[in-house]
Image (spheres, helix red, strand yellow):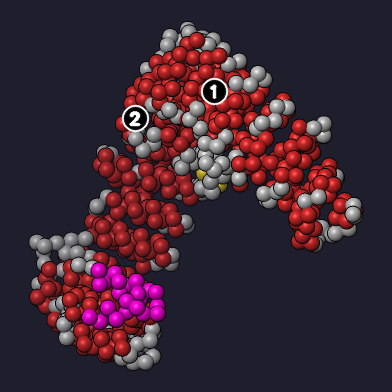
Amino acid sequence: MNNILEKISKISLENKFELISEIDKILERDNEDELNQLTGLFDINNNAVTEIVFNALSGTPGSLLLNNILFKIITGNYNVKMRSNAFNIIKNKAKINGNFLIDYCGNTDIKYKMFLSELLRFGNFTPRSLPSVCLRKFCDDENEIVRANAVESVGFLKLKLVQTLKKALINGTFLVKASAIFSLGELKIKSTTADLKYAFWSNKDNVIRKLIIDSIAKIDGETGLDFLIDIASLDSGNKRIDKIYLIKNIYRIYCENYKNKKIQNYIIKKIQNINAKINILKLEFYDDKLTKEAILFYFSLSNPKKSIKIFNFLMEYLNKNLITADNKEYKYIKESLRKVSYPVYIKKYLESIGFSFETKIASSGIFFNSYSILIEILSENRNFNELSKLLNYYKNKKMPVELKIALLNSSASIIHYGAPKLSKSVLKNALFLLDDVSGDVRKAAADLIGQSKNINYTKNIYNKAINENYLDVLDSYIKNIVNLSNNNKTYFNFFVNNLNSNNIKIIEISLRIIKKFKISLNKPLNKKDTANIYEKLKKLSGFKSDKIKILLASVIGNLSNSILGMLQYKDVFYDILIDLLKNNNSEEIKFNSLESLLKSGFKDSNVFFETIQPQNRSNMFKFKVIELIGRLKDEKSFDKLVDFLHNSDDILIKISILKSLYIVDGIRSKSVIKNYLTDNNEDLRNLAKELIESD
């Protein structure tokens, strides 16, 4: 028999699979001497080999012999490294199937019982209740460690051995009681809250009391919640319990009930009656994140006095921890800052950091800065005068983009609620910022102006749009131009007349605005207006630019469908669309023209079929046009669609045709659709089934 260590040492670590294969052979032979040598590899100074052996033994059910060897190591006089590896292998094996552990429960050796009472908690048992008998026996063991381990394992496995746990709670030593309290919390049986309450008042040990508070918070019954609140509301001179610990657990219940606003509001109401006298300046002394959140939560609900000291502390805490708006703490800090600060604190803070404004990336990947929260507070507190002054001050400074955007966004509250004089001031500054080097600032400025609903600013944005190079900024400009001038016939005609321009950018922007425009019902377009529009659009149909014609084709459909005055004249626009359709090869122009015909009420499906007859049309184009044919609901199209279906090999087109047939004539189409219930293609089969089963 070869020495295992010598044999394995000759296998290069680069040949990992050969090493694993050799270990598998040893496990298959199940020889005691070989297995002892294999587990001896836990004690060599080659971590890579040890890890491979560890993983191999953890991933196999293993034999009784191997398990005996591992338990012998766990309970024997071996070094910590050997015992730790053996323990973790047994633990990993138990996670896969823990039933083998039951075979060792009869062993009376104290070391076996100590480790087994702990190992049982990691097991995956079939049935789940399998370890109950073992654990009941261990819970009555004379050894305190065995009892405590067993009681705690009941909680980990969530076995409902309630009477066993109650007995341990009443009669147990410190360790056993602590384990019983933990397990009762894990079981979350509301009826045990009374036992935990009794234990709370019967024990003066602060550690035990804290554990009881933890468990009651986990059980999360309203009775338990009231109990925690009642204890926390005791006179502040009562030193029997740590109120911050109570507040943390009340806050835990608050978080766990994030979907139950009734309970959350109840907690908010009750927690304000707790006189905890928390010193927020000592927040950093707590390491636990939940405790910090709870303190900030409680403080945000209290009524602190204005304090520059607390203001500076909270801002420092915010900066140090890069707390962003997606974090719960952000909300609590913001509310606290709102309460403790005067506007002058915010102004001085911004002045103090001067040109050292900095945007960082928080651990969540979200951009962080310390000034947005202050500007939001000024807005929410309606400190409009200070907000207006800050925008005016920073508008022409070389400051971070985020600061200017935050000021512009928050200044919207001035437009909605502020005095006219202040509104005029912020809009003047927004106009100035339409020339900012940052596209994002320009967008924010346009959005602010758009919220004013003041039509007089329309041409200001329009003139800027003509020279704008960034598409997203241009989109924002057009959106706000429409917001400002919508329903105004004078401006509509202004944009229509600009279609005569020699500047292709002006034509494009004007078309995009017209596309989104809606004329008020009390000022419909008359015959003269319609003739003017027709003349301009007809001229554009001969334009060389495909980009303009693509836009033009979609504009006509939206016009005829949304402007009251055009409904009675829409037929005259058909010739423009037919012209675009026949004299252009671009599929996008053709599709937009067809879609506009559909929107305008055009019903002749022959025109649509003509566009998909040529062989060089893409399948995606055919698919989209066939969908339009379905929307026409022209009964004359049914037979043509069936012919097209029989002559098509493309699955995507067949899907489109079946859908369109169903829309054109739901009853008649089912005789065609049923033929695809047994088609080789799964998508066609599923669609056919769905359409056949539809009402």
In the image, which is nearer the foreground, mark 1 or mark 2? 1
Residue at the spot of label 1: 180
| x and y percentages locating residue 264 in the rendered image | 36, 30
Identify the residue at image location x=63%, y=21%: 141
Q: Quadrant of residue 223?
A: top left
Identify the residue at image location x=40%, y=39%: 376
The Cα atoms of the two marked residues, 1 and 2, are separated by 28 Å
Q: Quadrant of residue 469?
A: bottom left
Q: 256 and 432: which one is in front?
A: 256
Q: Is residue 531 magenta?
A: no
Q: 171 and 567: which one is in front?
A: 171
Q: Is residue 677 magenta?
A: yes
Classify the position of the C terminus by image quarter. bottom left
- Residues rendered magenta in the picture: 671-693
Identify the residue at image location x=32%, y=70%: 509
Q: Amino acid at mark 2?
A: Ile
Q: Which mark is residue 263?
A: 2
